[in-house]
Image (cartoon, grey):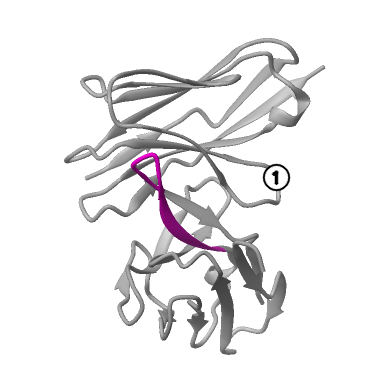
């Protein structure tokens, strides 16, 4: 079967760097997605990784290791507005997304 | 309309009642989805539609039905609501971005079944 694991909650300080990990188990691999979800709002797309390595997009970067079934989202120069849940998702064999439970990131001044 | 519109935003419903959650998109996306989101759990797929006229079952389809008469609309119906269907429901559609099938979500419908 498929399984995705993320930490439930993390706390970081404004201006700092935080790494949110995601491990997954899939029968095949068709990429890995990260979404951001502010409290009471809809998820919004952050990044997509299909090849190994680091993809940088401004303050946010996403890393993938297919051999280890592992990804992380790296957030730099944290701002209060980055307080949100971060959702990791991978497609199943029917290309429908399987979602992790999300990591709630709390930013403190 | 810009993106995906869901209605109602919030609803309290008596158990046993029938309820339809509406979803409309204006992006001409072929694929649409209904998810439910519960505390401590990831988004779970209820039903999906890859194109107008077709639908498929997701991870948790029991107690729900959908239809896809046209590209824009994808309503979700609870035939006889039960308290375990209390949840936040998100409609989504997907288009491609940089080779990825990216989901765009509606704002959500918060449903409470008493």
Quadrant in which the N terminus of chain B is drawn: bottom right
Residue B75 magenta-drawn? no
Residues B16 and B74: in front is: B74
Which residue ends up furthest to the right in the rendered image?
A109
State the image quarter where residue A8 is shown.
top right
Q: Residue at x 41, y 37 (%)?
A: A33
The segment highlighted magenta reads B90-101
Compared with residue B68, is residue B5 higher up or lower down, i.e. above or below? above
Please state which of residues B4 and A18 is positioned toward the viewer in this rendering.
B4
Q: Quadrant of residue A23?
A: top left
x and y percentages locating residue A50 in the rendered image = 30, 31
Front residue of this view, candidates B55 and B43: B55
Q: Residue at x 43, y 40 (%)?
A: A100
Q: Is residue B59 left or right of residue B35?
A: left
Decide whether the magenta segment is chiefly helix, strand or loop: strand
Q: As drawn, which residue projects farthest toward the left? A: A27
What residue sits right under mark 1 in the picture?
Answer: A39
Q: Position of residue A1 (x, y in %)?
A: 21, 45
Above-or-below relation of B90 to A77: below
Check the residue under mark 1 and report the chain it is in. A
């Amino acid at each position: 079967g498929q399984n995705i694991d993320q930490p439930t909650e993390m706390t970081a300080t404004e201006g700092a760097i935080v790494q949110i990990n995601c491990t997954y188990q899939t029968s095949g691999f068709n990429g890995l997605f990260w979404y951001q979800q502010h409290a009471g709002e809809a998820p919004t797309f952050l990044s997509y990784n299909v090849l190994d390595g680091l993809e940088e997009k401004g303050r946010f970067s996403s890393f993938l290791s297919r051999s280890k079934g592992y990804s992380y989202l790296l957030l730099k120069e944290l701002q209060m507005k980055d307080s949100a849940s971060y959702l990791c998702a991978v497609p199943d064999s029917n290309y429908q997304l399987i979602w992790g439970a999300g990591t709630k990131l709390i930013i403190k001044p | 309309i810009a993106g995906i519109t869901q209605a109602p935003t919030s609803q309290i419903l008596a158990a046993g009642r029938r309820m339809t959650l509406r979803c409309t998109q204006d992006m001409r996306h072929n694929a649409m989805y209904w998810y439910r989101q519960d505390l401590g759990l990831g988004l779970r797929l209820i039903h999906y539609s890859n194109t107008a006229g077709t639908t498929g079952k997701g991870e948790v389809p029991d107690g729900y039905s959908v239809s896809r008469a046209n590209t824009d609309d994808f309503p979700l119906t609870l035939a006889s609501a039960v308290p375990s269907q209390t949840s936040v429901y998100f409609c989504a559609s997907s288009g491609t971005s940089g080779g990825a099938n990216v989901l765009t979500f509606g704002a959500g419908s918060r449903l409470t079944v008493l």
